[in-house]
Amino acid sequence: MIGAIMNHILTKVPLFAGLDEAELGELANVMQERRVAPGELIIQQNSLGDEVYIITGGSVEVFIAGLSDERTLVLLGQGQVVGELALIDHGYRSASVRASQNEGCTLAILTGADFRDLCERNHHIGFLVMRNLAMDVAFKLRHRNLANM
């Protein structure tokens, strides 16, 4: 379970847009907080995943590893989310994620099982989160397709 300060951060996460204070509290109650050391690997590319990570402090680096090198895709900070596709399926992770080398990070972790249980108890939370996730995926696909034209 995460604290009130973390709950406040959840109000700024686009994935949770539209949830009221009580619903955010329900969500916070099923999350776990984890402090991650600088440079520590959080997600391994091509591994199976069932957890979503909300960055509540510090920053992370999202990167893909090739045969001989790695390429940083993006640096993410407080209020941003990684691993969100785990809410849809338990597929392979498309990139690796590690805590920043300088400061590490703090994460709020939501497991797929806890999310599904919460959705069974409160369908409105499930509807809004999945709608927000679908909108995010659609935006990213359109952006990628436009970039490839």
Image (cartoon, grey):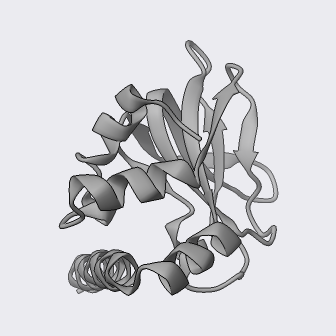
Which residue is depicted at the point 79% across and 72% down?
48
Residue 147 position, x and y percent, is 25, 76
Report the side of 98 relative to 16 (left or right): right
Q: Residue at x 71, y 82 (%)?
A: 91
Quadrant hosting residue 129: bottom left
The residue lying toward the viewer, choosing from 70 and 32, is: 32
Q: Is residue 132 left or right of residue 1?
A: left
- Image height check: is 121 above or below 76? below
Give the residue displayed 47% in from the left and 49% down from the top.
28
Residue 100, visible in the rendered structure: no
To which quarter of the image does residue 124 belong? bottom left
The number of discs equals 0
Q: Is residue 48 visible?
A: yes
Q: Residue at x 18, y 67 (%)?
A: 18
| Location of residue 46 in the rendering, given as x and y in whole percent from the top left corner | 77, 69
121 shown above or below 99:
below
Q: Quadrant of the N terminus?
A: top right
Residue 2 placed where, x, y %?
A: 53, 36
Q: Nearer the viewer, residue 76 or 126?
A: 126
Residue 21: give x, y in percent of width and height: 24, 52
Task: Check the picture and name the quadrant holding the C terminus.
Answer: bottom left
Along the viewing direction, whichever of 81 and 33 lies nearer the viewer: 33
